[in-house]
Image (spheres, helix red, strand yellow):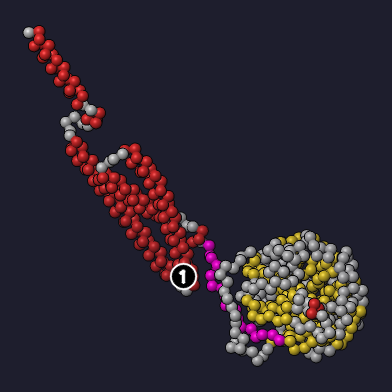
Amino acid sequence: RHSLAAAGAGAEAGAGVRMVSSLSPRARKKRPGTTRDEAKDDDHDKAKDDKDQVNQLVQEEVKKQKQLRQQRSKEKENLEEDGSGADVAARQVRLDLKWREEYAFAARVVAEQNANEGAEGGGKEEEHGGTGTGSGASASEIREERAKSSALAVASSAAKHEYSASVIRRQASKWPRPEWHAPWKLYRVTSGHLGWVRSIAFDPANEWFVSGSADRTIKVWDLASGRLKLTLTGHIEQVTGLAVSSRHPYMFSCGLDKQVKCWDLEYNKVIRHYHGHLSGIYAMDLHPNLDILFTGGRDSTCRVWDMRTKAQIHVLTGHDNTVCSILTQGSDPQVITGSHDSQIKLWDLVAAKPMTTLTHHKKGVRAMGLHPKEYTFASASSDNIKKFKLPEGKFMHNMLQHQRNIVNAIAVNDDGVMATCADNGNMWFWDWNSGNKFQEIQSPVQPGSLDSESGIFAASFDVTGTRLLTCEADKTIKFYKEDLEATPESHPIHFKPPRDIRRY
């Protein structure tokens, strides 16, 4: 009996050990009463449910996208109903830019989200190890559908906001085509001075003109024939500036002797002196409406004089170097000065303070020219020729070609022709609107002079704008006019639109 009882107890103990050992950790994790095949079926059903949910989300996003397309078509119809012509085209372009930026922004967000989710998914797969193929495929599909839904959500939220590109009017990419201008040719050379010819001014009636020279004399010439009429003496240094008043029978002159003189043209005598400059004077101009005279010189100032009382009204200070060019006009800014410190200042004449300082040039501004009709002006330096819009002094554009010389003079006429003259005798003619050079002339040197004496110091159109006169280093004054025999076929326009025009 004892042996049988021991054997039965041993059998029961062995069965208990076998029962406990058969409950492995994987079996203990399963629900009681389930097998491995049933667990696989449950995973498959769960993946199927997830896929159905994803399909439902995609259908909802497709509906949202369809609504967005309908909204865009309505906006286009409203554009066509609200306006016509250029306004509609401009608004259409801005709308297209808006949608394009929204799409690019959404695509960028989706790409970043895909990269982040891909990294997270790869780590999870490494943790779980060999999962079923069905569940892995469903996870990748879920990531793709989530990315699509997030992109659509970003696009729909971005449609509620306006980006700057949809508001700002961008500059037209098409550069204006230049107008055809007849080429200019030399038709007369007048000599009479014994030194460099430094300045020139025209009679308001366009009958005569005056020239100032390094021989310290001022000569009066007949414009039609080019003959010398009168010689005025009084300066003891080079005469660098001349101006003839359109309101009084007066002429004004300045020079490197620090003197400013007022000449009475009825008696051909000096009647007033204006004292105040501390060094040589390089530029002079008259106010078109007021009895005010402006002079600028090597003392880095522009001085404002009362023409009648000889009183110094203002001293416009602010430049760091020689003031070598002055422009005046009837409306603000009434005074514009250019200096060797590469700055251009637009002045408030009442307050005697600069309204704006333009620092676009890198070299000294030796010449400036005011357009007779437009509210614009051009400035020339050895780095470039630039055009500005008044009254705020907004930079418009550079000239399309680079003269690569020291430009001493600028002249502009009513037909939109601008001439720039350099210190090596090189003359370029430009179309004002497009900034395209249509002609280049090398000034011939007077026989008996050196080639180095071909520099041009001053240039000006006459009152009609049909004749251009240049004052040169070979002691001559040269007359230019348009070639009346030229045609657009014989002298075609050579124009290459700029690809990347510099806006500074």
**Which residue corresponds to the image point at 59% horizontal and 84% vertical from the top-left?**
492
- Mark 1 residue element: helix
Q: Is residue 298 left or right of residue 269?
A: left
Q: Residue furthest left?
A: 1
Residue 471 in the image, given as x and y percentages of width and height: 80, 80
**Which residue corresponds to the image point at 33% horizontal and 59% vertical from the top-left?**
66
Residue segment shown in magenta: 168-185
Q: Residue furthest front?
A: 3
User: Mark 1 is on which residue type?
Assistant: Val
Q: Is residue 474 magenta?
A: no
Q: Does residue 227 show up?
A: yes
Residue 229 in the image, given as x and y percentages of width and height: 87, 87
Residue 166 in the image, given as x and y percentages of width and height: 49, 61
Q: Quadrant of residue 272?
A: bottom right
Residue 40 in the image, given as x and y percentages of width and height: 21, 39
**Which residue corresponds to the image point at 49% horizontal and 72% vertical from the top-left?**
86
Q: Is residue 119 above or below residue 83?
A: above
Residue toward you, 26 or 379: 26
Q: Is residue 15 above or below residue 396?
A: above
The quarter in which the C terminus is drawn is bottom right
**Which residue corresponds to the image point at 31% horizontal and 38% vertical from the top-left?**
128
Prevalent SS, magenta region: loop
Q: Does residue 303 show up?
A: no
- From the image, tell me which residue sits under label 1: 88
Q: Residues within 10 Å of mark 1 (few under 14, many from 20)?
A: some
The quarter in which the N terminus is drawn is top left
Residue toward you, 96 or 206: 96
Residue toward you, 251 or 499: 499
